[in-house]
Every structure is written in structure tokens, then in C-alpha cells.
Amino acid sequence: MSAMYAANHLKGVTAIITMTESGRTALMTSRISSGLPIFAMSRHERTLNLTALYRGVTPVHFDSANDGVAAASEAVNLLRDKGYLMSGDLVIVTQGDVMSTVGSTNTTRILTVE
């Protein structure tokens, strides 16, 4: 996975955020060791319950009407507001172009927390 490669080779990354419908991306991410916290963000309670069982994954309820960069920014801001991230942190976000479609993860973003 490109997100895990970036996490292991890019200096300053503090967290990985997977915006997931089924939890599959969080599962794949948790299988590759990075030592970084992984946040599985989903609107589905069942998915959050599953991801709670994955190594190093913290499930966080997240429901956004937006897609793309706007949804990623909302997710980062939510984690900052909950105290998981701090301003200036570098994070990797994985998501699909369409938020409500299972199996559509096709984007990795590297964002700085504002």
C-alpha cells in the first residue's frame, strides 16, 4: 500500500487516517508495521466495531456529506478537536472519491493539521 510506504519513509508523519465504509483499508493498513496510530473513520457502527479489533487501529465515528478534500479536512479537524492530533502534525489520509461506496479507496493524501 502506498500509504504505508509513505508512512514508513516520509519523516514527520504522525498518524494514518483511513476513511472507510467496510473497514478493509484499516485492516490492510494495520497489517503493515509502522508504529504510527491508525484512525478508522466511518459512519457505520458495525465497521467501527470491527476495526476496534485490528492492531493499532482506533475507530472514530465520522459522517460527512462532503467528498474529496473537504471530507479529508473535516476528518483531520475532528481528530484535532478530539485531541488525537495537534496543529502542525503531518498525516496521511486514505479515502475513495465517493464516500458511500464500498471498495472505492483510490486516493492517498498527505495533509498538515491546521
Image (cartoon, rainbow, N blue to C red):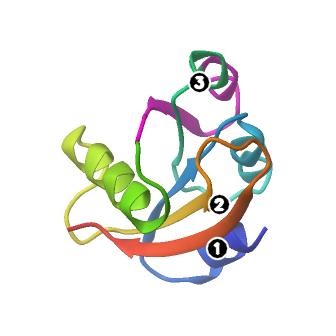
User: Which is in the foreground here, disc 3 or disc 2?
Assistant: 3
Say which label, 3 or 2, has the lower sequence index. 2
C-alpha span from label 3 to label 2: 21 Å
Q: Viewed as shown, does residue 112 lie left or right of 13?
A: left
Q: Position of residue 106 (x, y in %)?
A: 72, 66
C-alpha span from label 1 to label 3: 25 Å
Question: Which range of residues does the magenta coloring cover?
Answer: 49-64
Q: Position of residue 38 (x, y in %)?
A: 55, 48
SS under mark 3: helix
Mark drawn on residue 8:
1
Say which label, 1 or 2, has the lower sequence index. 1
Disc 2 marks a residue whose amino acid type is Ser
**Image-quadrant location for residue 53:** top right
Q: Which residue is mark 2?
A: 34
Q: Which residue is mark 3?
A: 48
Say which label, 1 or 3, has the lower sequence index. 1
Q: How many numbered circles are shown? A: 3
Residues at circles 1 and 2 in contact by the CB criterion of under 8 Å: yes
**Image-quadrant location for residue 65:** top left
- Mark 2 is surrounded, within 10 Å at the Cα level, by few (under 14), some (14 to 19) or many (20 or more) other residues, namely some
Residue 79 against residue 12 in the figure, above or below: above
Q: Quadrant of the N terminus?
A: bottom right
Disc 3 marks a residue whose amino acid type is Leu
Q: Position of residue 98 (x, y in %)?
A: 62, 54
- Mark 3 is surrounded, within 10 Å at the Cα level, by few (under 14), some (14 to 19) or many (20 or more) other residues, namely many
Residue 65 against residue 71 in the figure, above or below: above
C-alpha span from label 1 to label 2: 6 Å
